Amino acid sequence: MKDKIPDTQECIEISGSDVVLKINGIQSKKIPVEKFVSALQGAADAEVFPGIMPSGVKYAMQKGMFRVVVVEQPAMPRGVYVIADDSPVPYGSGVKSKLRWLSFPYVCLMILFYGDALSGYQQIFYTVKPLTSFEDELLLCNLPNVSTQGPGGLPYWFCSQYISGVTKLPWADKINKIVNHLWRTGFNWSSDVHEGLSQFNAMKTLDERISTFEKWETATKEDHDFALKVKWKSSGMNLKQATKKLFEFSAPPKKIKDVKGIADLLSRIETKNSKSNLKSTKVQESLNFLNNIIEEF
């Protein structure tokens, strides 16, 4: 009868600024926490969108906890509420609005998320054709609720202050809620009051047909697609450049260099049941994954 080969007991310990792999109680490998976390991040599979791609999403890029999502809205006339000429206030609950039928080119929303939540940094641009390349030029929009400059100096900023309850929604519902907020909450002069100048007022001298909401609506009735023929100003960026620029507004995550950093990370991770234990097979799979990372060094 053959002697039974004892099971190999593998253990990973994090102490101070080191990650240690022990096999049967004997130290086998030791690497810095910072290097281990970096390797772990690079080795882990990360889906930008778990499940079905949300409607309208043309592109998404992820860097660590941050992701930029690009949503394209088709060129078409839309019924939108805009501030009335005789509104008693420029924005807020007392604003008087009027439903107008306005022609729009393709509308490009660029949204920076932190994890599942809105970061507060998002932009809106126009294009006169669907996005097909990272080199496609982005044009300046003329939307009243888009500021020429927003928080931190981010240009062409679309306010998301009143878009609530986004974080816990599935991704398709997140995107739908943001898009619906754009088209259904109504356009007013909030950007002019709070940020100094809206894209509408910055662009109104570009073309007589968009100088007022009334003229915009009249031009729409004469030609539903006239917005595709306006010579919109260039933003000076293509899609690739704008994505890179938006990532610059993401708060740089603190580097995890020691056990305190890992403890802080774990404290911010929500689980469905923090008291439940993983199945032993899952534990072993995770252990094997971590061991492989350490063995690479």
Image: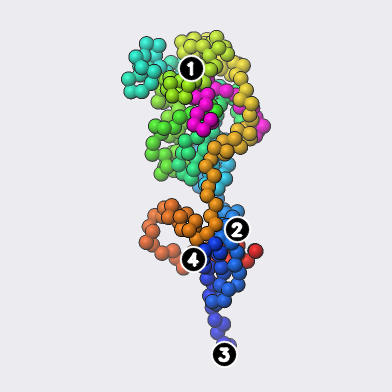
Q: Earlier in the sequence, mark 2 or mark 1?
A: 2
Tell me which numbered mark, 4 or 1, is placed earlier along the sequence.
Answer: 1
Q: Amino acid at mark 4?
A: Val
What whole-number distance in Å separates the C-alpha atoms at marks 4 and 3? 32 Å
Q: Amino acid at mark 2?
A: Lys
Where is 163 relative to 144, above or below? Answer: below
Mark 2 or mark 1, which is nearer to you? 2
Residue at mark 2 to residue at mark 4: CA–CA distance: 22 Å
Q: Are marks 2 and 1 in contact (CB under 8 Å)?
A: no
Question: What is the number of the mark on residue 1?
Answer: 3
Asked if 286 appears above or below 50 in the picture, the reply is below
Q: Which residue is mark 4?
A: 283
* Residue 62 found in image quarter: top right
Residue 216 percent across, percent down from the top left: 50, 13
Q: Which residue is mark 1?
A: 102
The mark found on residue 35 in the picture is 2
Q: Which residues are magenta?
A: 132-154
